[in-house]
Amino acid sequence: MPMKTFSDIEQHLIEKNKKYKTAIVAPSDMKTLRAVMTAFHKNLIEPIFVGDEQLLIKNAEEKQIDISNIEVIDFQEPYKALETAGKLACEGEIDIIIKGRYHPAEFVKRLFHENCEFCNLQNVQHISVCMANEYKKFLLLTDGFIHCQPDITVKSNLINGTVKLANQFGISLPKVALLAAVEVIYKQMPVTVEADILKNMYKDRTDFCLVDGPLSLDIAINNQAVKAKQFRASSVAGDADILVAPNIETANGMYKVLSLFSDSELGGVITGAKVPVVVPSPIDSEQTRYNSILLSLIAYHLSY
Amino acid sequence: MNKEPLQSSSQLIEQAIAIAQAGRKKKIVVAAAQDADVLDAVSQAKADNYVDPILVGDKTKIIMLAQENNIDITDIEIVDKTDVSEAAHTAIRLAADGDADAVMKGFLPTSALLKTLLDNKYNLKGQFILSHCAVLDIPGYHKLLNLTDGGMVVQPDVEQKKDIIENAILVSKALSLSPIKIAVSAPYNIVYDNQQHVRDDIEKLLPYISEKQNDVVIQAPIPFDSAVSKKTETKTYNKQEVIGDADIFVSNSIEECNIIAKTLIHFAQAVFAGVIVGAKVPVSLVSRSDTVQNKKTSIALAVLIADYYQQQNIWGDR
């Protein structure tokens, strides 16, 4: 059964009846903590708090969140908590890592780097998942958090990783749009040249995904724009499942727009490391954080 | 005249009307006007009484398109030039001679129009490079946001960013904004070693703009959400003025700006006005997928910029 909404994903996970061991690093972030407790009460995860125990107990009491019977590994310094969580993941002791009260960029830089046991950086990516009123199906967006200036090899990894996640939702042949400012290949716009190369790399892999680019955002997702601009025949245009942004600022900005100014349901997860990692943005609502946890449980079953 | 800051797309149009009522109604010349969307936009702007269009282009086609699409172009001056290049030159000549205050792109490539605009013989080059400003009215944001540059400069270096910002400041002044708050984009709000462009922004761009401009607050590095929302971790910043209150967001690439603007339009119902600035006359651009509201706002924005240039005598005698 394809999962078409976040509730479908939740239902799928409930039926699966598996409790994922989840480390929450520096857990004293109340929005994240609430989302974690929701997942716990629905029997989706088995949380382990890694961080300042006293602070956690104090904050949880203030907000009347019952955290009794949940294991705590006490660390005063957040970076030590993070190190421990990474180590537990490498040892196969935990299935998911969630960021609590920790600067998002610092967290990411410390956890994911070249030549570490926890990940091969080239495979790591952030994927946002959006369900917008204007689109009526899942839209996956990558990468707004990890790779500042992804080259072609990394972009190809980004495509592959996102396709695999889309497959988990039951989107069997995802349509991938390589975003640019225009739909034409101009030498002066390297992003368009790169998109063309990538598209050609995937032209014989139409059993895996359908790739087109360079596409502007309106051509990628808006059928009316496709018609108005009399755009050439394309199996992706107007109906993309996956948007690959040309650079980090673009994907990051898009996600922030969706989060701040649209009614979209959102979630996000970092895939490609030993275990999926949830790094909520400070602007994320509790619901978005919960959706992100759901995504991480789905992403757990990806192989790299 | 109203000197309150303009904070919505409807205020842009109201102000353009006020300028016309004050006896300074502007003329906008359309280059290669045989384009139904453009005709529709100028016809409506004329009906609202804030601009007098001059159409330069294939007269037969223009009249045919107007009839087919029920667009009222009576009383609009048409200069018959079937050749597109000739139409561009005629339109720019009108602007150069002061017979038009703003230019609008019709049925021709943007590059062809801008090349003509920058032709030395017209003396319309300004002090800075040309750049694109997308002025957005975003439901949920308390003021207009000027996203730049999503249309001209592909990957601006520090020198180009200086010009892009100078141009955007002129646009903000045309909207009576004071102080003008500028956020320069970066993916993170802290600087990492490998981000040379972020360090360049901080070490070269910020001091240059801050020293040169009085009424401007500029900050970097600012991710998009911090520019428009106070919900982010603001304790990262020493100065808070720009956080959640930016007038201008300066991007690092054409893609970033273009795609963020389109996300705002598609998913957040933002109203959008696009204009190319940097020359002595503003150039209004509308695209096929723009709504009527977007098109009318683009024209109003060009009117406001042209009026500001003239009132402040920015470019001296043309």
Image: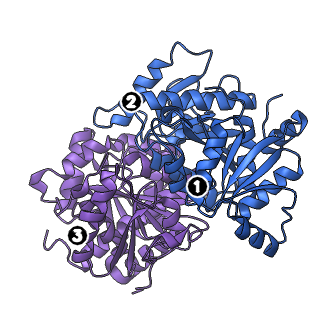
The answer, for residue B101, to whether it is visible in the render is no
Q: Which residue is mark 1?
A: A80
Query: What's the amino acid at mark 1?
Result: Lys
Q: Which chain is purple?
A: B
The answer, for residue B147, to whether it is visible in the render is yes
Which circle, 1 or 3, is nearer the viewer? 1
Q: Is residue A21 above or below residue B198?
A: above
Q: Is residue B96 left or right of residue A42?
A: left
User: In which quarter of the view is residue A5 placed?
Assistant: top right
The structure's colour scheme is: by chain
Q: Chain of mark 2?
A: A
Label 3 element class: helix
Badges 2 and 3, same chain: no
Q: Which chain is blue?
A: A
Badges 1 and 2, same chain: yes
Q: Chain of mark 1?
A: A
Q: Which residue is mark 2?
A: A194
Q: Which residue is mark 3?
A: B208
